[in-house]
Image: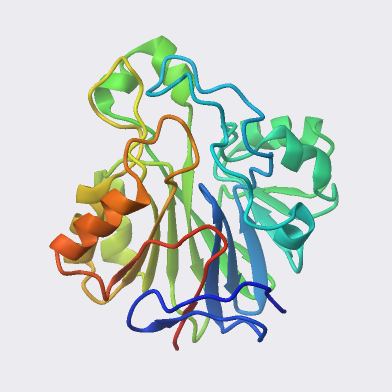
Amino acid sequence: MKWRKTLLAAFLGMTMMTGSAFAQVSYQHVRNATGKLAYNDTVFLIDPMLAEKGRYEGFAGSFNSEVRNPKVDLPESKEDVLKDVDALIVTHTHLDHWDEVAQQFINKDIPVFVQDDKDATEIRKEGFRNIQVLDRDIEFQGVRLTRVEGTHGTEEMYANPAYSALLGESMGVVFAAPGEKTTYLMGDTVWTARVDKTLQNRQPDILIMNTGYAKSICYNDSIIMGTEDVGRAATRMPNAKIVAVHMDAINHCTISRKNMRDFVHSRKIDKQVAVPDDGQIINFDK
């Protein structure tokens, strides 16, 4: 597999790659929550949002709703984003994780892993034929996939029936294979006891965290994680490598990469936490 970008090292224990084969585990940050995880010689495309800059209106009732989405273009062509992809992980079907351009452009026979029957039905109606619900552990090409239920907001938000319906359900996924680094894709969630339990039970080597601290105008709290959650993860899992994403691309995210990098530097966890640019590839040393 070959990549076209020239990249710099993100932090100790990770190297950037260009023009050479994937390491056993690597992650290319594409944009927002979209990324490519190469794991055990299998490439998973996570939460593909493939629209051009400004295609969609900002999310109504959210922070900076007058700003159109996505705020930036893809770092490479849609064809390059999809190159070498073996399967999709769709953590939930909000627009910034699964958009109409992805639905129209991606081959309808590709395996798609989703959280529940509701999302499976929706994606099946969009023409996709090979959908698997992660209602149990599933092995795909030697990679064991485990669903972790996410909580896409606070208890106060979910107590409001209308807002709860808007938030819906989301999932994280744990990737595991013999001899490989266990990787926890946390997805759109706030910090919960379930997150703590997953960290304790699975002891992941790699965490991919959505940390843009996205907000509505109705609540003070966020519907996803932010800087303090990265700090908490670094404390809970001092030997894990952390990748912070879901910033600088969608109107309602209130934390930028600069904010996150400043926080990481202030906490002196630069060697543990990477905040990749769009298109950047991180190789995790074995």
Q: How many marks?
A: 0
The answer to whether 129 appears left or right of 13 in the picture is: right
Q: Residue at x 31, y 14 (%)?
A: 218
Is residue 128 visible from the viewing direction of this image?
Answer: no
Q: Residue at x 82, y 38 (%)?
A: 104
Q: Nearer the viewer, residue 109 or 13?
A: 13
- Split into 4 quadrants, where in the image is the C terminus? bottom left
Determine whether 238 is above or below 32 in the image: below
The percent position of residue 129, horizontal first and vertical second, equals 84, 45
- Split into 4 quadrants, where in the image is the N terminus? bottom right
Is residue 190 visible from the viewing direction of this image?
Answer: yes
Q: Residue at x 28, y 72 (%)?
A: 272
Q: Nearer the viewer, residue 206 or 52?
A: 52
The percent position of residue 96, horizontal first and vertical second, equals 56, 36
Determine whether 74 is above or below 99 in the image: below
Determine whether 68 is above or below 61 in the image: below
Q: Residue at x 39, y 36 (%)?
A: 253
The answer to whether 163 appears left or right of 37 in the picture is: left
The answer to whether 272 appears left or right of 147 in the picture is: left
